[in-house]
Amino acid sequence: MPRPNGSIRRDLLARMVVPLLLIMLLGGASAYGLARYFSQIVLDQWLHDSAISLAHRVKWEDGRATVDLPEGAREILEWDMMDRIYYEVVSGRGERVVANASLPMPPSGSSLGEAPLYYDGRVGEAPVRVLAVAVKVPDEKPLIVKVAETKRKRDALASRVLWISIGLSLLLAAISAAAIWYAIGRGMASMENAVRRVRSMHAAAPLTPINADRTLPVEVLPLVQEINDLMRDLSRAHRLNQRFIADAAHQLRTPLATLRVQLDFALRETDPARHLRAINDAIGVLTRMGRMLHQLLTLAKADESEPRADIPDAVVDLDVIAREEVERRLDDAVDAGIDLGYAGSGRSVPIQGVEELVREAVANLVDNALRYAGGGARVTVGVDADAPEVYVDDDGPGIPAVERVKVTQRFYRIAGTTADGCGLGLAIASEIAQRHGGRLALEEGGAEKGLRARLVFPASAAGRKQDRRAGRRTATGESMPDTTADVSAGGMSA
């Protein structure tokens, strides 16, 4: 048993895990960005509160700005467990009023008004977050109040949020992968149920189609339908093979026994004349067996051919086939003392079908007529372009009306028939006609005796075009070709 190429479950999981991880990472990055953004807002608000508190302590005395900042208030302003707090108040004339560090000025191009301005800078080597706000004073330019803090708390908070986001993303990815694995497994369980059902059905009844009920997932139905089509084709081929084997075994048993008897007799016979007669009898048995095998194979081929809807678009000319079959059997008709003739349509009679099978059907009707009509009979093979059809007409003993349906069954022979045959000729012709969407009709002969066997086929597209052209020629007053040949009627019996 070949090693499987892969697992659908693993393939689905692999295809879903990568997008899932990307989605989780994107979600973690978004959560990290949002957390950092809102933490920045909270810490910036603390800077703003500190700057406003410091601005409220600015006093104006004798034209000079002072800051009332007691030692306790200074300690509260500068106290922080993780970061250093810096502040600086500069007058409108550029004089430093109070400060514990020299803070960077706002970036060039930025305008400082009553609204606070946030920007990043450095105090020495330490990166800081700075807030600057302008405070109006009487008859002077506004004071600039700046408050800054280092970024250790911000970086620690961002790092903690980042690791928490990564951990949550990985945890969610693992939980999602487990959920997907479970969901895929539950989904695959329905397919496994279908496999077990097929296995049990195959054990109970081989080549039985799968019952496509509601328990099967929709995605599996096309595969089940294709398998069912294959099962039906295999079942049909199996039945045809069994029927062929059964027919062959049934029909060849007697000729083989007869052949063995004839050969044994020839081996024991010392008289040359009787020995030669036994050999000729054995050759006759072999000839009949060969014909029987040919008919069985033809019947099997007709069974295996597709129905009318799927027959190839090959065009077959009934007129040519009928004429050639008459020419091929002229010598046999002379030897049997039968007057064999042909009544053609005078023009092409195209049908859609398989030429080999149509030719075999016509050949079987002609052979049947020559075999059963008897010496002195008249057999006429004709073609009717209007139907279209090919017929074989005879004036022999004919077939009783009650027997005409039975003689198209395989291996059926009318009681009392002495002529050589195995009862397959008409069955083959009927089967081939049905496969081409037509029919075999058995009627009373034209002279109110004998039999007329008609193979009627559907008209092909080429034949309909030809009929329309012929109709137009008739409408214009042109003469139509003569469709009757100078032939004699013949006779046929089943």
Image (spheres, rainbow, N blue to C red):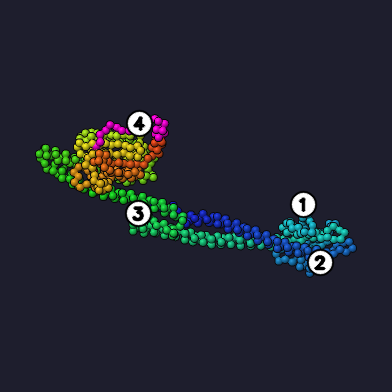
Q: Nearer the viewer, residue 272 or 442?
A: 442
Q: Report the Cα–Cα distance between label 4 and label 3.
A: 56 Å
- The reply to whether the C-beta atoms of the residues labelled 1 and 3 are less than 8 Å apart is no
Q: Which tag, 1 or 3, sits closer to the chain's start?
A: 1
Question: Disc 3 residue type?
Answer: Leu
In the image, the segment drawn in magenta is: 469-491
Q: Residue at x 56, y 60 (%)?
A: 170
Question: Are the residues tagged 4 and 1 within 8 Å (C-beta)?
Answer: no
Which label's residue is closer to the chain start, 4 or 2?
2
In the rendered structure, are the residues bearing label 4 and label 3 in contact, judged by CB atoms less than 8 Å apart?
Answer: no
Which residue: 60% across, 58% down?
27
Q: CA distance from mark 4 to mark 1?
A: 106 Å
Mark 2 / mark 3, whichever is N-terminal: 2
Left or right of 463 in this view: 118: right
SS for dot 2: loop
> Is any part of residue 332 visible from this angle?
no
Residue labelled with disc 1: 109
Q: Nearer the viewer, residue 294 or 371?
A: 371
- Dividing the picture into quadrants, the one containing residue 74 is bottom right
Q: Are marks 4 and 2 in contact (CB under 8 Å)?
A: no
Closer to the N terminus: mark 4 or mark 1? 1
Q: Which residue is mark 3?
A: 207
Dot 1: element? loop
Determine which residue is flagged by label 4: 481
Please say whether residue 185 is one of the residues in the magenta stretch. Answer: no
Q: Give the label on residue 69, or none.
A: 2
Residue drawn at 24 percent across, 44 percent down: 399
